[in-house]
Amino acid sequence: LRKVFSGIQPTGVPHIGNYYGAIKPWVEMQDSHGNVILSVVDMHAITMPGGEPKKLRQNIQEMFASLIACGIDPEKTILFQQSAVSKHAELGWILGCLTTMPRLQHLPQWKQKSEALSEVPLGVFTYPVLQTADILLYKATDVPVGDDQVKHIELARDLANLFNKKYGETFPKPKPVVGSFNRIKSLRSPTNKMSKSEKDAKSRIDITDSPEVIREKFKKAITDFTSKITYEPTDRPGVSNLISIHAAFANSTPQKIGEENSHLDTLQYKLLVADVVIAGTAKIREKFAEMMRNKEYLEQTIQLGNDKARQIAEETYKEVIHRVGFV
Ligand code: ATP
Ligand code: MG
């Protein structure tokens, strides 16, 4: 039986890259196969230094509101908050005892993240183990992720294997499901991907941005000195990113969109893409505002999701402690 698990960090309102790269595929899986479990992984969100509790609290609520606004249906999908299910931390400990330091040191994200910090918190080193616990607690088989996470899912497979060998067959081996969607790039530095935690808010379009803000951000998007519209991702990353965004919203290919708009100059084209994005996010924007006005519904929905997740997690954990010898 196919079981899907995925997570998203509450590090800000999702942007259009998150939407096309992750959230929309989740909604499609939810509607086609069901059996989807999604977690707002707040324990992962505190691994990087510098966060504030007040901001985190707001980010968690906004992430739930965003996911529901984008079409995640809490009746069909188990949508929950990671920290509300204590078994994640508990299984994480057990799995940590099966993990070696070199195994974690070789992960590309560890190298990147630790190099960027002067003092590296232990959580930045061990979070892939927690991520494994997230997946295994629900005995997930399929884990939709970005290509940057594939190595972490390989770790999850290895740890599932190690656990099964040492303690007896318990976990299915999860496999990464990498979407074919190309990453949407930052509007300010179009060779980098669009990202929630990038400081410059003008670098991304949040799914909740107002029409005015969307228009402003596109006007300020970095392009090059040529005013023609052509799709050349390597040589002209800025314009090509606008075309990719347009193609995603128009459900078309960048090549086609590039040709169809070759008669426009870059400023005209920026305004056109802005309009496409404004129209394409209208429903999400409305639903998000509705959710944020009805905090009671939101809170209740989170609680219900947490209860469902907890039930599954506790069942798995009972099996785990029995195997490990804790009882
Ligand atoms: P952060 O900066 O906090 O890491 P992020 O924008 O990278 O935020 P994540 O929470 O790390 O977002 O990732 C959530 C999901 O969105 C992942 O599946 C990831 O692959 C996908 N994703 C993130 N950025 C993009 C992007 N620019 N284009 C397409 N998909 C993306
Ligand atoms: Mg990220």
Image (spheres, rainbow, N blue to C red):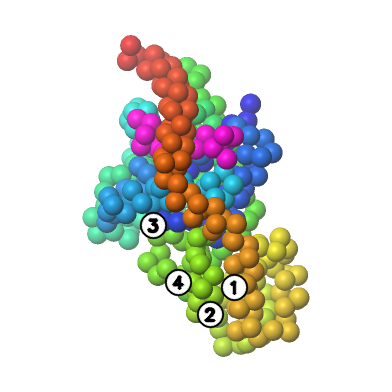
- Of the numbered discs 1 and 4, the one sitting upstream in the chain is 4
Q: Is residue 189 visible?
A: no
The residue at which mark 2 appears reads as 219
Q: Residues within 10 Å of mark 3 (few under 14, many from 20)?
A: few
Answer left or right for 189 relative to 119.
Answer: right
Q: Which mark is residue 112?
A: 3
**Amino acid type assigned to the residue bearing label 3 in the image:** Gln
Which quadrant would residue 21 be assigned to in this image?
bottom right
Provide the secondary structure element on which disc 2 rests: helix
Q: CA distance from mark 3 to mark 1?
A: 33 Å
Please check the rendered image and state whether residue 75 is part of the magenta-colored stretch, yes or no.
Answer: yes
Q: In the image, is the residue at mark 4 within 8 Å of ligand 1 by its beta carbon?
A: no
Q: Residues within 10 Å of mark 4 (few under 14, many from 20)?
A: some
x%, y% of residue 1?
Answer: 63, 26
Q: CA distance from mark 2 to mark 4?
A: 10 Å
Span colored in magenta: 73-86
Residue at 29%, 58% in the rendered image: 117
Q: Closer to the camera: disc 3 or disc 1? A: 1
Please check the rendered image and state whether residue 58 is part of the magenta-colored stretch, yes or no.
Answer: no
Residue 78 to residue 276: above or below = above
The residue at which mark 4 appears reads as 202
Q: Are marks 4 and 3 in contact (CB under 8 Å)?
A: no
Residue at 37%, 34% in the rendered image: 84
Q: CA distance from mark 4 to mark 3?
A: 24 Å
Q: Is residue 231 visible?
A: yes
Q: Residues within 10 Å of mark 1 (few under 14, many from 20)?
A: many
Q: Are marks 1 and 4 in contact (CB under 8 Å)?
A: no
- Of the numbered discs 3 and 1, the one sitting upstream in the chain is 3
Provide the secondary structure element on which disc 1 rests: helix
Q: CA distance from mark 1 to mark 4?
A: 13 Å
**Amino acid type assigned to the residue bearing label 1 in the image:** Ala
